[in-house]
Image: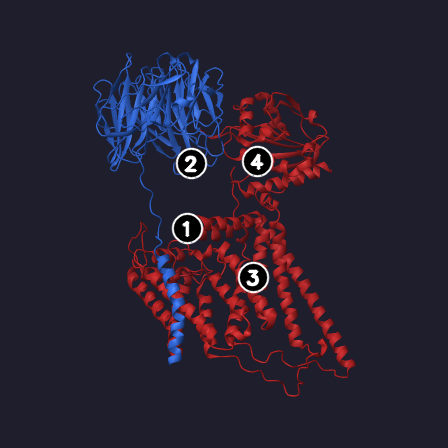
Chain colours: A blue, B red
Amino acid sequence: MIGRRRSALRLAPPCLVGLAAMVLLAGTPAAPASAAGGPPYLHAPLASALSTPQGSWAVVAMGDLGQLTNTFWELFFRAPGGTSWKLVTPPGVADNGGLTVAIDASGTTTVGFEASQRLRSSPLALSSDDGSNWGPALVPTALAVSPDALALGSGGHTALALVRRGSGEVLQSTAQQMAWTPTPGASMLRDGSSPACRIDGLTAVALGAGSVPMVGTGCRRAGQVGVFVRTGSRWKLTGPVLHAAGIGATSVLRLDSSGGPSTALVVGARRGGAAVVALWLSATGTWSQSPALSVGAGRPVLSSAVADGGEQVVLLGQRPSGAEVETVAVPGLRWTRVADPPPGTRTVAPSGNGSIAAFAVHGSELRVFTLSPGAHVWALTQRMSVDIAYGSS
Amino acid sequence: MGRSLQSGNPVIVSSFHSALFHQFFVILLIGAGLAIAFNVVRTVQFRHLKAEARPRFPTTPAWEYTEPAARRILRTGFGLLWVFDGLLQIQASMPIGLPSGVIQPSAGTSPGWVQHLVSSGLTIWTLHPVQAATASVWIQIGLGVWLLVAPRGVWSRLGGLAGLGWGLVVWSFGEAFGGIFAPGVSFLFGAPGAVLLYCVAGLLVALPERAWATPRLGRTLSAGVGAFFIGMAVLQAWPGRGFWHGGVSVHGSPAGTLTTMVRQMSHTPQPGYLSSWVSAFASFDAAHGWAVNLVVVVVLAASGAALCTGRRRLMLVALTAAVVLCLAVWVLVQDVGFMGGTGTDPNSMVPLVLLMVAGYVAMVRLPSRVAVPAGSPPAQPGRPWWDRLTPAYLLRAVAASGALAIVLVGTAPLSLAAANPNADPIISEALDGTPNVVNMPAPPFALTDQRGAPVSLSSLRGRTIALTFLDPVCTSDCPLIAQEFKQADEQLGGDSAKVEFVAIVANPIYRSVSFTTAFDRQEGLDRVPNWLFLTGSVAQLRAIWNSYGVLVQAVGAGAMIAHSDIAFVIDQHGRERSVLADDPGTGGVVAQSFSSVLLNRIDAARHA
């Protein structure tokens, strides 16, 4: 009996070691913890639209949106005064990574293909006939993922490209040659430079009045809008400080001058979420600001459109209750929430005379709904089936 | 474009079965050789004995004591398990399906270092799937046969050690350490991995037989199992791991951990009766999850504690309860291990039962003295071998040698293949088909290279040409194909100066020199001296595409230009020698294997 008890005691240590190991193992969570939300810096969604006196352009993601290789970005054009949108996606390149559009004052359109999968450059397609015919060009480095990664100056003499080197680099070229070189003064746009802004990555490019190069950035300094203008070989911060209270770090979502005066759309960190502010640059060089539109943290802006020569900005936002459309215009400078968009809406665009178009996508079928000024109901105005080559890339 | 290799690919399956058949034939030959050797030795032995006027073979047993019963349970039990596992490896889906269907899911939730380790083993398997799959078959069958036919002595202990070694390889690379470093580890789901239990058994078989002469080894083994049970009971009872919930939603899943797992198992292909049992248990656990887990925790904890005490009666009761629990878990939770999905073994419950039983038997049944047959002369030290070698011993030694030969038949081809860093060409052929061997004049071309210089087929006369058609703004296949051409060039070494790697643009829009140079820079081909990326006018290109039978066309909006993935090998006299499909699939090893095929065809063209 004693012997048995002793043997049991001798065997106790391995039992205890095993027990301790299992207790340690038990502390391993059954499922990995979810990632933290992170700061509400928002990247501008590529689902975007641009309206100029020469016409309106909308970039819409179609296909199987859950799979990168079966998501195809399509480009639609509506002529001024026209009633329907036309599919004008440039052929010859897989556009699963997205499209970015730039238009100069003469109506020349340049479309940039975002690099995706194994392609690490960005082919361009140029059209001077509203997308009926396209010619090829190339940015030998991947364009930054931004709806304003390309800019064309008036007369098509100058072009800017924002590319994915480091936290963003600006290249410039003559629009005819498309031979890209780094823009002068690039070191002034590196992260952390400019004490007044404390740059946090480049987000957009534009060519303002007189083809003056402009760059939108993130700013770590609270409330400061990161818009820089190049004079000679120097970049000068011209973005204002936001009027709205409680805004932290900011980032320029859109920066556009293609329709006339420069327009910027800025997102700022705000306690518990973020806020979006639209800004317009007057001919005298002063910025007008819209009130701050509170949006949630995460990725609340799904699509943005700059319309009517930059005088109107349309946002498609995501709220817990569903998608919503907000619009703000220079006259009045107030955000107005309009009727909730139809299910499946991916892109919103100006549609002439103050009306708004919503592009609702269901696989390869596109439905265009239009909301007239003052109306409370979206009207189905166009339906088309797009030939999508699933599995082609 | 971007096709992937399916686990039932007929080329791979056929190659796998063919390799198995050939290796089986080799094993038969070895068996015949060993049978001849056995008879030769016996004949020589008989002649020696006859010369000494003693025409009878020795019959004195080699061992004073019988083989310990517990050791025999382990040896035969795990021998049969290894043979069964080897037979499971013959499934047609093993060469391609095992990495994606078994190994990667096992490692999927483990920490990064485990995944990294597993991935290094996976690389060998995915580069050489046929050799790896056949090696698994023969190694495991060989180990099983070895344990079964070599009951005693050095041969037997070596068999145990071999099982331990191979088991550790499988446990770490194939089972990702049985998932013990992953969240959600549980006794019910097979922790700590069936093969670790095979390793324990191998270690026990490899011990000197004197270790079994007292009950101590049995007590230690039982206590080890007991400690394991107690630890698993703690894990099972730990709150927040989803085992108490039954059908109630937990961690975002629609049901508790066990219910979810069993429901998944019930949906895998298996016999109807088994599926209905498993499905019924899933429903029962969904309704009574708390009670089910309580039973598991109590049985594990109580039987674990009892096994630690060393008291025989208590241990027998605990053993019975634990065996019942194990069998229930084996059928209702583990789906008898090999029924659901790509099964490679019967999972952990059967080997665990064998270890438990062996531990108990080692305590209660010690080896007994061997009865010496009447009239047998006592063994005489110093006598020649023919006077000591019994026929039974000789037969076992020959059989063990045969088992070792089976293991070697599996390991040798895999070792040779693993030394080759390139993927097996069978992978490329499985996806793209066998290259067509032709002998006809290659259609001429005269285009511009990436430096703006004119290049024609005649200007390349005297050099072997590997020719393909690439889209310089392609996002998927073309960069992979270009890398295969580059790799083939690197493998040519000093002979690369005699070969020209040529691509012709396959995009009617994005075709200027700026695109070909950008592509070369992107793929690192701008530093390859014998690489040419040719372009020309649309009319020139169309004429060449037509003459080579290459389809180039625009497809849906936003898609890349569709073009044939095809390559040609042209000899130094300008004659086409091979036509190869060069679809790289989804990349990785499927693509890698194309460079081997291309090299073979270049070599054939150079020596044609």
- Measured in 3D between alpha carbons, the distance from the residue under mark 2 to the one under mark 4, in whole angstroms, is 23 Å
Q: Quadrant of the C terminus of chain B?
A: top right
Q: Are marks 3 and 2 in contact (CB under 8 Å)?
A: no
- Measured in 3D between alpha carbons, the distance from the residue under mark 3 to the one under mark 4, in whole angstroms, is 38 Å
Residue flagged by tag 2: what amino acid is it? Leu
* Among numbered discs 3 and 1, the one appearing first in the sequence: 1
Q: Circle 4 is placed at which residue position?
A: B483
Residue flagged by tag 3: what amino acid is it? Gln
Q: Chain of mark 2?
A: A
- Measured in 3D between alpha carbons, the distance from the residue under mark 3 to the one under mark 1, in whole angstroms, is 27 Å
Q: Circle 3 is placed at which residue position?
A: B140
- Measured in 3D between alpha carbons, the distance from the residue under mark 1 to the one under mark 4, in whole angstroms, is 32 Å
Q: Circle 1 is placed at which residue position?
A: B109
Q: Chain of mark 4?
A: B
Q: Which element carries disc 1, helix, strand or loop?
A: loop
- Residue B158 visible in rendering: yes
- Measured in 3D between alpha carbons, the distance from the residue under mark 3 to the one under mark 2, in whole angstroms, is 42 Å
Residue flagged by tag 4: what amino acid is it? Gln
Q: Which element carries disc 4, helix, strand or loop?
A: helix
Q: Are marks 3 and 4 in contact (CB under 8 Å)?
A: no
User: Residue at the bottom extreme?
Assistant: B375
Q: Identify the disc placed on residue A68.
A: 2
Closer-to-camera residue (B19/A253): A253
Same chain under badges 1 and 4? The reply is yes
Residue A66 in the figure: left or right of residue B79: left
* Among numbered discs 1 and 4, the one appearing first in the sequence: 1
Closer-to-camera residue (A367/A313): A313
